[in-house]
Image: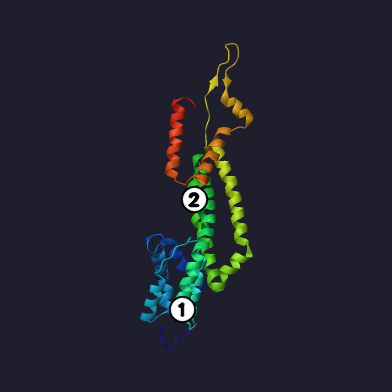
């Protein structure tokens, strides 16, 4: 870094939020196998780095520092953006923070934050919101299309808050988040809500019945298998279908193309022989 004496550089919360919003929009645009989200992260950091490092040589070093491999979940990973900005600011103001410390912090946190973000955002919130939107749309309500906007709205609010929190708390912020246990409670609550929602959607949208019936004698009513199943547990066949798919996902593999093909084969074959 240049040895010139510099006045202390101040980064505002607006700068931090703007940096994260830029990253949120472009994180997936420049992905490559070699660097994944690094290009998007570095691009979002440019206004911050220009403010911190007016010297071209220092700016070049900073840009190179943030072009190394990086990949996380953009919303809950926003804490990393805030911490990175705080560390870059400390470095620009003369503190002894080298490249390895900043890169190591990003590398160490990107995995845990991706796990947290994927569990909350993509595995829980997205199915719930999209399921609700599909339900409203199927019933003819125009509100369904606007419900989809809840996901990016929630993500932007959370991302802006966490990025600023990360910036304020610096490199200690992630430790306080994880040690508090709040993340685990949030994941558990969101997962529970998600299970209820998936159960309700499954019972509403998975339709499966059998027309099988047996004539025991001409003097008695036909033995209708579907009536017997409904007397045992209403919706038993759809429940078994959902559990069967869940078992396949958890025990075999998560290749959705294979699952789709299996469902089609069973459905067409069962319909052809009169089973469904």
Residue 167: percent from left, percent from top: 53, 72
Q: Is residue 86 above or below residue 130?
A: below
Q: Crowding at label 2, few (<14), some or many (≥20) Cα neighbours within 10 Å?
A: some
Residue at x 55% of width, y 40% of height: 243
N-terminal-most mark, 2 or 1: 1
Q: Is residue 274 above or below residue 155?
A: above
Mark linked to residue 65: none
Residue at x 58% of width, y 51% of height: 191
* Residue 138 seen: yes
Residue 244: percent from left, percent from top: 53, 39
Give the image quarter of residue 272. top left
Residue at x 52% of width, y 46% of height: 250
Residue at x 52% of width, y 45% of height: 251
Please tell me whether mark 2 or mark 1 is closer to you in this view: 1
Q: Are marks 2 and 1 in contact (CB under 8 Å)?
A: no
Residue 246: percent from left, percent from top: 53, 43
Tag 2, which secondary structure? loop
Q: Crowding at label 1, few (<14), some or many (≥20) Cα neighbours within 10 Å?
A: few
Say which of 146 and 217 sits in front: 217
Residue 201: percent from left, percent from top: 55, 41
Residue labelled with disc 2: 148
Task: Give the residue at the far front of this rendering.
Answer: 252
Image position of 35 (left or right of 128)? left
Q: Is residue 10 above or below residue 256?
A: below
Say which of 144 and 276 sits in front: 276
Task: Give the residue at the far top of this rendering.
Answer: 219
Marks 2/1: CA–CA distance: 43 Å
Residue labelled with disc 1: 98
């Amino acid at each position: 870094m240049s040895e010139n004496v510099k006045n202390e550089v101040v980064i505002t919360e607006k700068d931090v939020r703007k940096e994260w919003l830029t990253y949120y929009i472009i994180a997936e645009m420049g992905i490559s196998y070699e660097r994944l989200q690094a290009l998007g992260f570095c691009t979002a950091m440019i206004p911050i780095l220009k403010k911190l490092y007016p010297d071209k040589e220092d700016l070049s070093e900073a840009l190179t520092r943030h072009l190394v491999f990086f990949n996380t979940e953009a919303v809950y990973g926003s804490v990393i953006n805030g911490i990175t900005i705080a560390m870059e600011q400390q470095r620009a103001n003369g503190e002894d923070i080298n490249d390895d410390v900043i890169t190591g912090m990003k590398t160490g946190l990107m995995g845990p934050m991706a796990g947290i973000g994927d569990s909350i955002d993509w595995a829980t919130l997205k199915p719930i919101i999209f399921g609700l939107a599909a339900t409203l749309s199927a019933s003819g309500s125009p509100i369904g299309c606007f419900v989809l906007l809840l996901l990016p709205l929630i993500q932007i609010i959370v991302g802006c808050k966490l990025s600023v929190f990360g910036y304020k708390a610096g490199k200690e912020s992630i430790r306080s988040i994880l040690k508090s246990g709040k993340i685990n409670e949030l994941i558990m609550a969101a997962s529970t809500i998600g299970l209820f929602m998936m159960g309700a959607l499954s019972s509403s949208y998975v339709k499966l019945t059998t027309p099988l019936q047996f004539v025991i004698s001409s003097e008695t009513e036909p033995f209708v298998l579907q009536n017997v199943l409904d007397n045992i547990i209403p919706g038993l066949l759809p429940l078994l279908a959902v559990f069967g798919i869940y078992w396949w996902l958890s025990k075999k593999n998560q290749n959705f193309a294979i699952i789709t093909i299996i469902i089609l084969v069973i459905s067409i074959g069962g319909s052809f022989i009169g089973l469904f």
